[in-house]
Image (cartoon, grey):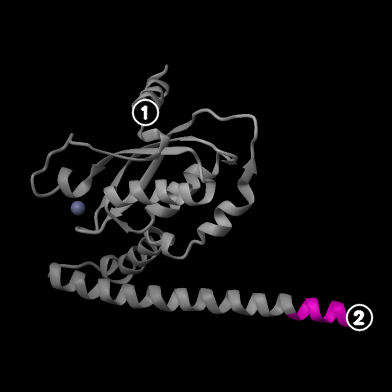
Amino acid sequence: MENIKESEQLKLNDLQLEVRKIEAEKAKEAKIAEHMRQILLLSNPELTEELLEKTPLRYAKALTEFTQGYRDNIESLLRDAIFTCENYKDLIVVQDITFISTCEHHLLPFYGDCVIGYIPKQKILGLSKFPRLVNSLSKKFQLQERLTRDIAEVLNQYLEPEGIVVIMKASHSCMCFRGIKSWDSQTKTLYKLGTLNEKENLQRFMDLVHLK
Ligand SMILES: [Zn+2]
């Protein structure tokens, strides 16, 4: 009986914690919305009611989504999907992982796709976790260079593979739609660790990526 009471109390505590989190999140969004309203007032003297009343909160909610990575817990995201694999010691390539991130210099989106290749030592990761990890690390204010490195370093830390390589290809809104307005330009970044630094392994990885 006591045990049931105790577990009910724990559930209640968890629930209260969750409610407090949601309330704090809502209060933060309301604050962001108010600041956004002020920015809109500064930028346009002919604002409609829609723009002033509803758009700021929509923007705040979008910003919450774009920064979800700061609240994600990578440990719990990956923990249950790391498996032991003794009999496969060759390249594993996951490609066409799409992502959208926010450039920390202009607060504009950059987006594209990502390829991850690794040679396991003992541990492999459930396949769906690759796009989940890329998504989580993308939902921060980022630089493509740092994002590419972060993906490789996190996987290196959790999987301790023989080697790992990450390639990202992205269009940057700040370059396509403003400033130089270079519509078609794309940026590619590559970060590699361990045996993927060896020419032969890197070439095999490239061959697999381009295999039709
Ligand atoms: Zn930028």
- Residue 19 figure quarter: bottom right
Identity of the residue drawn at 35% across and 67% down: 60
Q: What residue sits right under mark 2 in the picture?
A: 1
Compared across the picture, whether 95 is left or right of 122 comes to left
Residue 83 pos. (x, y %): 64, 43
Identity of the residue drawn at 66% across and 75% down: 14
Quarter holding the C terminus is top left
Residue 26 pos. (x, y %): 45, 74
Give the main secondary structure, helix, strand or loop, of the magenta stretch.
helix
Compared across the picture, whether 133 is left or right of 165 comes to right
Residue extending furthest left? 180
Residue 54 pos. (x, y %): 34, 67
Q: Is the Cβ of the residue at disc 1 closer than 8 Å to that at disc 2?
A: no
Residue 30 pos. (x, y %): 38, 76
Q: Nearer the viewer, residue 105 or 126?
A: 126
Identity of the residue drawn at 88% across and 83% down: 2
| Above or below, comparing residue 185 to residue 200 in the picture | below
Question: Which residue range is magenta in the image?
Answer: 1-9
Q: Nearer the viewer, residue 32 or 212?
A: 212
* SS of the residue under disc 1: helix
Q: Amino acid at mark 2?
A: Met
How far is disc 1 from disc 2 in space, using C-alphas? 61 Å
- Residue 168 figure quarter: top left
Q: Is residue 79 magenta?
A: no
Q: Is residue 3 magenta?
A: yes
Q: What residue sits right under mark 1 in the picture?
A: 202
